[in-house]
Amino acid sequence: MNRNRKTDQLLGVLVKGCAILAGTLLLLVILYLVHESLPLLRTTGAGRLLTDSAWRPTSGQFGLWPMIAGTLTVTAGALLLATPIGLLSALFCRCYAPRPLGKLLRRILELLAGLPSVVYGFWGLVVLVPLIARIRPPGASVLAGILVVAIMVLPTIALLVDAALESVPADYSRGAAALGMTRWGALRGVILPAASSGIFTAVLLATARALGETMAALMVCGNVVRTPESLLDPVRTLTANIALEMAYAMDLHRSSLFATGLLLALIVTGLVALAEVLSPEGIDA
Amino acid sequence: MNENIAQTNPRHGLLLALGLLSLLVASCGQSRVTSQSANRLTLTGSSTVAPLATEIARRYEDQHPGVRIDVQTGGSARGIADARSGVADIGMVSRDLKTSESDLLAFTIAGDGIALIVNRANPVTELSDEQVVAIYRGQIRNWSHVGGEDRTITVVNKAEGRSTLELFLSHFGLENSEIRADVVIGDNEQGVKTVAGLPGALGYVSIGTAETDAARGVSIRLLPMGGVEASVSSLQQGRFPLSRRLNLVSSLPPEGLAKSFIDFARSAEVADLVAGLAFVPIRP
């Protein structure tokens, strides 16, 4: 008994240490971003990041607005496409498909989720971009970005929604069937509401993945710093900005790229906070 | 039991956090050390030369245990200034020395050149400098104006800060702010893939990359510059106009470790490193 208690205490310390380590790491990353952005924020102030008319970091102009617009457009577009498809394919896998077929589809989705993003980006660059260029050059555009990112987050949404549906107790659907509800009626009235928190989390994680997508966006979006006016215009995302320029950036230019990262971290934090407020039951995966 | 867990000493976690924080502080406060001791060598200067110098330095260190070589960037101007003042043993400069800098000695370690590339399906075989400038400024927007098919030109430019962009701009007398780009790319391979996928594209990449990819059957074609064929060999013969030399500079005739390192950097032993970074080995 005594020994058990000791083990328990030890485990308590260990678990606590790990949790604090995870939290501290995030804190350290944010601190480092702030530390590296400071030279820029001190010289120009944070406001100019939003108000400068252009992004010419080597000649002292640091306007990030077109890239914020680019990131938000690509993310929103990708989610609008991927959420309904992901949700419905999860419903099919879990509730409509014969068991073996559902299982097969799930394996395929898992495979898709595991492919590295550079593979999607490469496919987009070699196949999708030339196709879109036939409609209007250059082809590397908001549309290409939305399509590639949507394909990338689709499995995330589908798998997480599928897991949420799976965790709904089987008694619920049996009860609904016993009440004589149709399959769709049971889904809409009982199962989807019971899984809503999980579905919400799925969309949230997909949003975070879309916001953070770097390689694929860099390869297919065109990377021109201009607020896009149509779906066929090229666009640069915040992540692509960092990846494109970090290798050769110095001084304030480098600092402005860290500020870009800080801004991205703030956007994600804001998103999670917003989700916490909007979600009725809080977030849990 | 649960209470027990909750009551475990909070100091453990705090200590851990403090430890991590101190690590961060230590890494931020790292100072630059320049030492003139016999086993240390400091190189400063061009950010174009720095990646190559760093790789050469790693290989040199492997072959000469105990030697430590620091490579710091800061632009060619810093390379010149530090070599003069003796702050660095060797400066890195991504151009030839000017006449005002004739007090320094330059040792070329590699050549860097860029080639204009178009899609292989594009019938245009040559562009004059004026045409290139007009296309990049957005004044010419269709290939039919320069003797090609009726097709919109997709202007492919490099991201800010890249040395290829710098060389391109200075050669054509352009400012990056005047360029009307349709696609901005990062590394050379991305440029090649972009141009290979778009029949109307015009781009520029390092000459080594372009030549290798074109020979491998990628759907791109290198355009000659000022009548000179764009190839590694014309660059090595010094005939290709859109090129520059990457130099190590020193204020005194190098001796000891510095001389040994410069000789090593110019030897055939590092030719693979030079080619790996899309530069061109210079035959002495």
Image (tube, coloured by chain):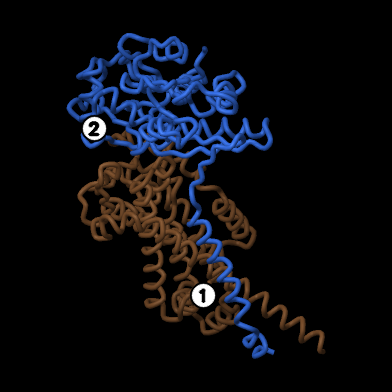
Chain colours: A brown, B blue
* Same chain for the residues under marks 2 and 1 in the image: no
- Residue A46 falls in image quadrant: bottom left
* Position above or below: A17 against B156: below
* x then y, percent, for residue A252: 33, 48
The answer to whether residue B220 is seen in the rendering is: no
Q: Chain of mark 1?
A: A
Q: CA distance from mark 2 to mark 1?
A: 52 Å
* x then y, percent, for residue B209: 47, 24
Q: Which residue is mark 1?
A: A284
- The residue under label 2 is which amino acid type? Glu
Image check: B254 left or right of B122? right
- Residue for point 27% across, 50% down: A62
Labels 2 & 1 near each other (Cβ < 8 A) = no
Secondary structure of the residue carrying tag 1 is loop
Q: Chain of mark 2?
A: B
Q: Which of the two residues, B263 or A200, is positioned nearer the viewer here?
A: B263
The residue mark sitting in front, 2 or 1, is 2
- Residue for point 56% across, 48% down: A115
* x then y, percent, for residue B155: 29, 30
Q: Which residue is mark 2?
A: B175
- Residue A261 falls in image quadrant: bottom left
